[in-house]
Amino acid sequence: MTEAPISGGVVHDLPDDLGAALASDAEALKTWEDITPLARNEWICWTISVKRDETRAKHVTQALENLAAGKRRPCCWPGCPHRERVGRRS
């Protein structure tokens, strides 16, 4: 049986490290698939927007913990600066 792919965001594709973490935690994955594509985009951008690998690993861990606890958005983060491009055409 083939597992369904994990959903991504509206601007950002799901990175491999976050996808692997989500696949390993049923509760976090359940919340992930229940939130909107824009909310998933916020988690992805929050995870990938850091400069250091160590910080990114912490963000992946924290995202997993927060999603497993039912949190739908990253706390205390202004949001994805890339989302303004969604729906705009030149």
Image: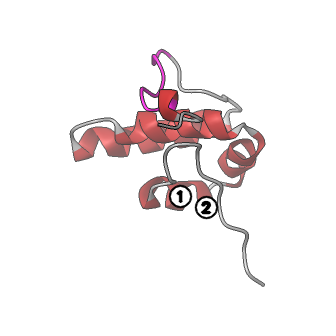
Nearer the observer, 7 or 57: 7
Residue 26 percent location from the top left of the image: 70, 55
Nearer the observer, 44 or 22: 44
The residue shown at (29%, 35%) is 50
The residue shown at (45%, 61%) is 16
Query: What secondary structure is marked by label 1?
Result: helix
Badge 1, how many Cα within 10 Å: few under 14, some, many 20+?
Answer: some
Q: Which residue is mark 1?
A: 19
Depicted 35 relative to depicted 78: above or below: below
Give the quadrant of residue 69.
top right
Nearer the observer, 72 or 58: 72
Alpha carbon distance from label 1 to label 2: 6 Å
Q: How many marks?
A: 2
- Farthest bottom residue? 1
Query: Which kind of residue does numbered mark 1 sit on?
Result: Gly
* Residue 37 appears anywhere in the view: yes
Q: Is residue 80 magenta?
A: yes
Q: Which residue is mark 2?
A: 23
Where does the N terminus fall, quadrant-wise?
bottom right
Residue 15 percent location from the top left of the image: 45, 55
- Left or right placement of residue 51 versus residue 87 in this view: left
Q: Is residue 23 magenta?
A: no
The residue shown at (60%, 40%) is 40
Query: In the drawing, what numbered circle is on residue 1?
Result: none
Query: Which kind of residue does numbered mark 2 sit on?
Result: Ala
Report the span colored magenta.
76-83
* Residue 24 appears anywhere in the view: no
Residue 30 percent location from the top left of the image: 75, 48
Q: Check whether the beta carbons of the residues at disc 1 and disc 2 lie within 8 A of each other.
A: yes
Give the quadrant of residue 59.
top left
Query: What secondary structure is marked by label 2?
Result: helix
Depicted 79 relative to depicted 17: above or below: above
